[in-house]
Image: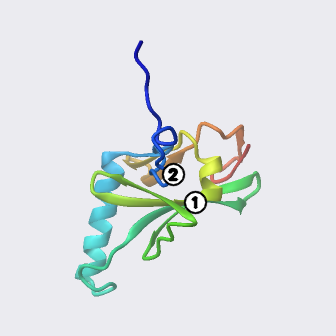
Amino acid sequence: MATTASAANLGLKDAPPAPTITVTEKAAEEVKRVIAEMEAAGQIEPGTKLYLRVRVQGGGCSGFQNKLDLDTKYDEKLDHKFEFYGVDVVVDKRSMLYLAGAVVDYHVDLNKKGFTIHNPNAKSTCGCGSSYSM
């Protein structure tokens, strides 16, 4: 009989959580491009460690909004850290509760260009699509 061992069963209390969010390759490439552009413009020192921070905050007309930022801070007690296509991604533990299954992507379309976060937990969105309820 085959069994699977979880991190908890193996006594690994500090094992990293399995990613509950996904960052697409296109989104990761755009993050790397933005960081390189910031370095070239002298906005940050070359080699500065930046994390893509994904978070949920209250606001908007429907209650919750997703936010993406570049952040120099990572706190192992407060954040989960993941790596997607060479980009380190951090999500605070509170936001992680709302982002299960979310996908961060980057689109270049005729009418719009930018990052999107598809959150399958959103029950409804506002008219402009920038906030949602759960």
Closer to the chain start, of discs 2 and 1, is: 2
Q: Say left or right for 86 vs 56.
A: left
Q: Residue at x 72, y 59 (%)?
A: 60
The amino acid sitting under disc 2 is: Lys
Residue that lies at the very extreme toward the top in this rendered image: 1
Please give left or right for residue 73 compared with residue 27 in the image.
Answer: right
Q: Residue at x 23, y 81 (%)?
A: 40
Quadrant location, the C terminus: top right
Residue 36 on image: x %, y %: 25, 72
| Image x and y of residue 82, in percent | 41, 54
Relative to 8, is 85 on the left or the right? Answer: left
Residue 66 in view here: no
**Residue 18 in the image: above or below residue 61:** above
Out of 44 and 131, give the one closest to the viewer. 44
The quadrant in which residue 4 appears is top left
Q: Name which residue type carries label 1.
A: Arg
In the rendered structure, find residue 13 and report the number of the disc placed on it: 2
Q: Secondary structure at mark 1?
A: strand
Q: Nearer the viewer, residue 49 or 37?
A: 49
The quarter holding residue 35 reads bottom left
Q: Quadrant of the N terminus?
A: top left
In the rendered image, residue 38, in percent from the top left (x then y), is placed at: 31, 78
Residue 14 in the figure: left or right of residue 123: left
- Decide: is 9 above or below 45: above
Q: Is residue 51 visible?
A: yes
Q: Is residue 133 above or below residue 74?
A: above
The Cα–Cα distance between marks 2 and 1, rounded to whole angstroms, is 24 Å
The crowd level at tag 1 (other Cα within 10 Å; few <14, some 14-19, many 20+) is some
Mark 2 residue element: loop
Report the mark closest to the observer, 2 or 1.
2
Which mark, by number, is residue 55? 1
How far from the left and from the top, in percent, is residue 75?
51, 71
